[in-house]
Each structure stands twice: as C-alpha cells, then as structure tokens.
Amino acid sequence: MPEPLTPGELLTLDRQHVWHPYGPMPGKAAPLLVESASGVRLRLAEPVEGQDELVDGMSSWWSAVHGYNHPVLNDAAHGQLERMSHVMFGGLTHEPAVRLAKRLVDISPEPLQHVFLADSGSVSVEVAVKMCLQYWRSLGKPRKQRLLTWRGGYHGDTWQPMSVCDPDGGMHELWQGALPRQIFADAPPAGFDAAPDEAYAAHLRELIGRHAEELAAVIVEPVVQGAGGMSFHSPAYLRVLREACDEHGVLLVFDEIATGFGRTGALFAAEHAGVAPDVMCLGKALTGGYLTLAATLCTTAVADGISRGALPVLAHGPTFMGNPLAAAVADASISLLLSQDWGQEVKRIEAGLRNGLAAAADLPGVREVRVLGAIGVVQLDHEVDMAAATRAAVREGVWLRPFRDLIYTMPPYITGDDDVARICAAVCAAAREG
Ligand SMILES: *Cc1c(COP(=O)(O)O)cnc(C)c1O
C-alpha cells in the first residue's frame, strides 16, 4: 500500500496538478474530498460546514440511479473482474457486450436494432454524427453533411457535439468560428404540458425543408434539455421533427444520454412522443454510475446504408470499445431497474420534488420552479453565486452542483421521502443564499 496522504495533502496536490470539469489550473474553488459513498450518501474525508455525509442530489451527473455501493452492481463488477476486466473488441467478442447490446435493442424503440458501444457520451454522439454523414455518403449524397438542432441544447464536449451545443451563452461560445457551422432552430417553447405552438412547429418544418439538401441529420435531446439550461418542452415537437425528417429525407438523432433509463418518467423520453429516432445515444445512467460507457443505437436502414457504401464499414473503434467490466455492470444495472417498479419510484420522487420545491417559487430572485419526473429545477433571475449556493446546500447536508442561473437536482431513484425533502430544503437554501 502507498503511504497514506492526509486530506490537506490531497487537496494541495489536487489543486496543483489535477484538472476538474470546466475549471482553471490551478483550481480556484476547493473541491470536497469524498472518501466513500453508499446508498444516496457521499462520505467526506473531513467535515465541511459541520457535515461529514452529504445526500447526493446530483446522482453524479444523472448517472447513479441506484445509488452508490449497490450490492447487485458490486457483485456484477466483482464477478466480471474475476473473469476479465478488458479485452480488445476487434476480432474478439464476449458475453457482457453481447448481452448488453441485445438488452438495449429489446428495451429501446423497436426500429433501433444495432449497437455501437463507446466509452463516453460525447464519443457516442461523435459516432452518431459519423453514422449519419457516412450513411448519406454511401448513398451518393456527400453534400448532406450538416446538422440541425434547436438552441438551448447540450451534446457533449468533443468537437462534433460542441458544434450542436447552444452557440450563445453555452459553454462552447469560445469556439464559434472554429467549429463546423450547424443550423440552429429557435429553442423549443418551454413546458412539458404546454399546448404545442403551431408557429414554432412551422418554423421547424420550414428550416428542415429549406436546408434538406445539405442536412445529414437533426439531433436533439428529447423532452429535457439538460446542461444547456434544464428546460422541458412538449413531446409534440418530437413528432414534428419525425414527420419533417421523413418528408425531407433527413435522419433523426435523439440524444438520450441524460434522459434515458427512466429519469423523465418514461424509460426513454422518446416514448412520451411515441416516435422512434433513426439513431439514439445512451450514456450516463447506462452503468448505474459505476463506469464510463455509452452506446449509439441505429436502425437497420442506417446500418445497411453504411455497410453498402464505398467504404463498407463504420470507421470507428475505440481501444476500450465494449469494455466487459462496464458492459457487465450496465446489464446488471438495467436488470435491477427493470426488476422493480421504477416508474412508481420516479413518480414518488416527482411528487416529493413538487411538494418540497413549491416554497422556492416565492423566494426573491427566483424566476421559475419546474419539475418533471425525478428532475427538479429552480431557475433564478441572476447568475448563481456558486460558492454561496454550494455552502448553503452543504450546510443542509446535501450535495448540489448549480450552474449559470440554475439550482437543480436529479436524485438517485432510491432516495427516500425524507431525503427528497432534505434535498428540497437544500435547493431552497441554495436559492436563498445563491
Ligand atoms: C452528459 C451529456 C453528454 C456527454 O456525455 P459525456 O459522457 O459527459 O461525454 C451528451 N449529451 C447529453 C444530453 C448529456 O447530458
């Protein structure tokens, strides 16, 4: 065993050497040092604001839907580790990847039949884009290589995904001019239950029709736009996109990396609209938050198109493609999800969030409170003071990670009613002090 390091030493080394998400070097705000995690609780290496444990209101960015240190997922990981942690996927295959792919095909919208296993959400979006462009190239239409999306979206941090993130005010504003120039529709009108806006639907149809010659695909996050602004829209617009894409010969990609596996109250958000995309990306909750893994699913038409082209292969193959350890845990995580009444748990959390966050609506500086499935959002009328908001939440014994003008939560599905109430109290405290 290496010499143990004190919490102070670890934090100093962290600051000197380790990049954190969207952070400067050296780091400015000191991160909290987590020693272990179990159930819905993160155990800190040393108390902060009088708390040595925090209820995780973030599910580690949408992923830890079953909570931490779950015996079923631990068993799956241990069992697979004893057999092999990894083998290359070129020329070799294995049961975890095959089982997982079959399961994803079984539970996803019917037309999706083929699975590319990638190592992160962003890479799965890169693969989705590559599939779409290559499909049209194979069909002798190389001009169809642009993407259309709506504003307010987020699809990841690598190059193609960045090009379809919201170009204004988003995290990727810096790269305007360097990224491929995509086509942006207005952001969808807000509100899951809002009556569909005919003028907006016409705007989508018009834009897709006008650019059809150069469009490979439309890519959107269905129903919930996550890191682009935590906003919800009517599923009706997904039907509009499906129709317009079919009419004009454009592929439709749903990025369900955040919404997949029940978060919005449907197993996949596309189900709210009753439409299937041509290509779908999954990630985040895929392994229950244990390991990094993502998947790009496509229809047989897309796969056939690619495989009949001049280069009759999908030219992509990450070193850790189909990682057995991650695939085994993912399969166990999906089994675990489907073995329980997850829809009821999400509904229960939704009711708890509605109840507990209602009070936030009356706080000064709060613009809107919205809840959908196991997602609760308090939007302020100003930029959150991250340090103050985080401190307020920690004081309530809860881990939150606000951004921009948003304080939000998407707790693990196993979060009990008392802990949901506690998270809500922390969101309200963060809104008051942030
Ligand atoms: C998080 C996210 C991604 C990127 O996934 P990573 O695993 O972080 O690369 C892409 N799309 C959506 C909708 C996401 O929420």
Image: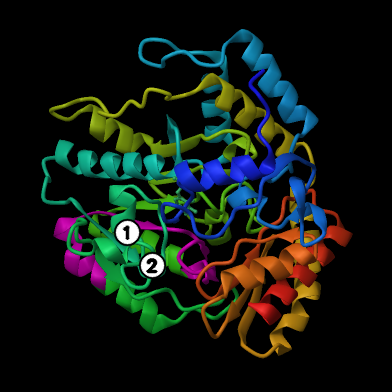
Q: Nearer the viewer, mark 2 or mark 1?
A: 2
Res 146 → quadrant: bottom left
Name the residue located 42 percent from the left edge and 50 percent from the top edge. Answer: 277
Q: Is residue 12 magenta?
A: no
Rendering coords of residue 225 (x, y %)? 49, 64
Name the residue located 19 percent from the left edge and 56 percent from the top edge. Answer: 180
Name the residue located 32 percent from the left edge and 33 percent from the top edge. Answer: 303
- Give the residues drawn in magenta, as a range: 207-236
Where is 78 relative to 238, above or below?
A: above
Where is 407 relative to 131, above or below?
A: below
Q: Which residue is mark 1?
A: 164
Rendering coords of residue 393 (x, y %)? 72, 66
The N terminus: image quadrant: top right
Badge 2 density bin: few <14, some 14–19, many ≥20, Cα 10 Å: some
Rendering coords of residue 34 (x, y %)? 69, 44
Q: Amino acid at mark 1?
A: Val
Rendering coords of residue 271 (x, y %)? 57, 55
Q: Amino acid at mark 2?
A: Gly
